[in-house]
Every structure is written in C-alpha cells, then in structure tokens.
Image (spheres, rainbow, N blue to C red):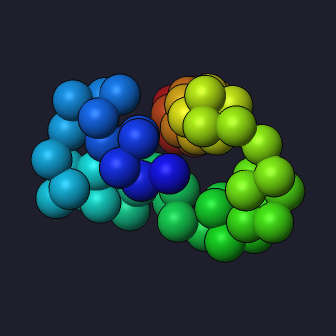
C-alpha cells in the first residue's frame, strides 16, 4: 500500500512519511487497518486522499 501510494503521488519514502505524519494518516491506517486491507489499492489511495483533505479543512 505504501509503495503504491508513493508511486501514485510521485513522492519519496521520506516525503510520504512526512505527509502521513503531518496529517496523522498513520493513526487513520492503524484504526481501520483490517477494513482498508480488504479493499483494492485504488480505494486505499482514494480513502487516504479524502482523509488528508478532511484534515486540511479542519485545520483552517
């Protein structure tokens, strides 16, 4: 999942880790790990994108 997200977003591993840490994506992944891993790669990337967008809006 991480490699697919990294490739899709054209990020390095370090950049992806920073993005996930800044937006608390790690906590999101841990909280719904089982549900996420029963879905496809595209769904996971889209879910993470939506989560990050929601976090950005809530910080404004």
- Judge whether 11 appears above or below 8 on screen: below
Residue drawn at 31 percent across, 42 percent down: 6
Q: Nearer the viewer, residue 56 or 39?
A: 39
Q: In the rendering, at what x and y percent does residue 55 appear?
A: 58, 40
Q: Nearer the viewer, residue 14 or 53?
A: 14
Left/right placement of residue 34 relative to residue 17 reads right
Residue drawn at 73 percent across, 66 percent down: 33
Q: In the rendering, at what x and y percent does residue 43 appear?
A: 69, 31
Residue 19 in sight in this render:
no
- Judge whether 27 appears above or below 50 on screen: below
Left/right placement of residue 39 relative to residue 12 reads right
Q: In the rendering, at what x and y percent does residue 53 appear?
A: 55, 28
Q: In the rendering, at what x and y percent does residue 10 appear?
A: 21, 29
How many marks the image carries: the answer is 0
Residue drawn at 66 percent across, 71 percent down: 30
Residue 5 in sight in this render:
yes
Quadrant hosting residue 32: bottom right
Residue drawn at 20 percent across, 56 percent down: 13
Quadrant hosting residue 27: bottom right
- Judge whether 32 appears above or below 57 on screen: below
Q: Nearer the viewer, residue 58 or 46?
A: 46
């Amino acid at each position: 999942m991480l490699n697919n997200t990294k490739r899709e977003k054209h990020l390095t591993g370090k950049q992806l880790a920073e993005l996930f840490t800044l937006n608390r994506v790690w906590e999101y992944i841990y909280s719904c790990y089982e549900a996420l891993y029963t879905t496809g790669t595209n769904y996971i990337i889209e879910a993470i994108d939506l989560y990050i967008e929601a976090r950005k809006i809530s910080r404004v």
